[in-house]
Amino acid sequence: MYFDIYYKNHLGNAISLVREPYRLQTAELFDYSWEPYTESGYITDFSKEIVKKSATLTISAGTEQEYIDAINKFYEVTELDILNMNPGRLYIGNQYMECYIISSSKTEWEYGIEQMDIDIIFATDYPNWVEETVYEFEMAEAISTDNKVYVGRYAYRYANGLTNKEVVIDHFYEMNFLMRIYGPVVNPLVTIGNNQYLVYIVLDSGEYIEIDSRNGTIIKRKSNGDVVNAFNNRSKEYDVFKRIDPGRKKINWSGKFKFDLVLYAERSEPKWGKFLTKN
């Protein structure tokens, strides 16, 4: 059995860390810690500082040229993130942590032997493992009014009434989200559970807005690619950045526009058992 572990840089170039010519030997990927804050001798809060995780990777190949190419590829793929100040993602199965590879120390290598050990260090300022679930909600005109369960990449139930949907969110804690609403629409409103996500804005065809709960931002992307800060267009009656609780949730909207909902299940350590694959 192998852990399905790989690194993907911000351009989408991926390197498996458990397949030849790369083989992960040891790593601190499953370790975590919280920093407690104290006041008057009592713990009052917790936080996570910038985290560095070490790992040892072996590079080996059947020919000298393959060996040289593998060493150069690993450096170039990971270094691009540093040079562009844009983190890559370290994946374990479907779970990822955004990070940089900031150090590479070579050991156990010598002339004429196509094998090298590299001690690497991952660094992250957001030390959470994230698994994404994507829900896509189409315009009501394209949806049957019958009670049906549509099975696809992500299954969810379409209930009677074009604007009432229901999803079951499987996680142990509230989740950050990204909501992407597509035009044309005026003042789009989505209700999830007891909270309203409302932005006072006009979207033409080809435009969309993104509500990002983790970063507390709302942007409008125009059809020509221009980005507009729409933070001040949010409704202040409800919290448009309110994270979404797990469980069965009703989702309501007018049905006159399309939107996507991306949920981020976050953990301090990767979920065990979901990332094992056969070689």
Image (cartoon, grey):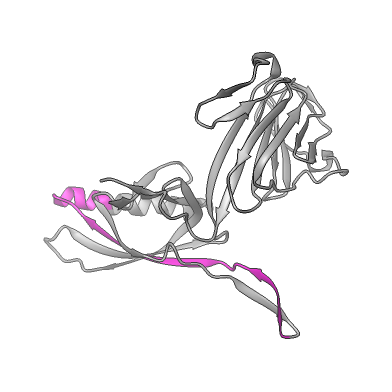
Which residue is outermost to the front?
Answer: 147
Q: Eyeballing the image, is 121 above or below 145? A: below
Percent x, y for residue 238? 84, 44
Q: Is residue 277 above or below residue 199?
A: below
- At x 68% / y 16%, what residue is drawn? 145
Which residue sits furthest left? 112
The residue drawn where x is 51% and y is 50% is 84
Image x and y of residue 152, in percent: 50, 27
Quadrant of res 233: top right
Q: Quadrant of residue 13?
A: top left
Task: Give the percent coordinates (x, y) of residue 16.
Answer: 33, 48
Residue 231 image point, x, y percent:
79, 43
Q: Mark yes or no: residue 154 visible.
A: yes
Left or right, residue 199 beside residue 170:
right
Is residue 115 rendered to the left or right of residue 274?
A: left
Residue 56 can be seen, yes or no: no
**Residue located farthest toward the bottom when viewing the structure as drawn:** 41
**Residue at left 58%, top 45%?**
170
Residue in view at x 75 percent, y 30 percent? 252
Q: Residue 26 versus residue 218: which sits nearer the camera?
A: 26
Q: Is residue 256 magenta?
A: no
Residue range (magenta): 41-70
Location of residue 66 with respect to 127 vertically, above or below: above
Viewed as shown, does residue 128 lie left or right of 93? Answer: right
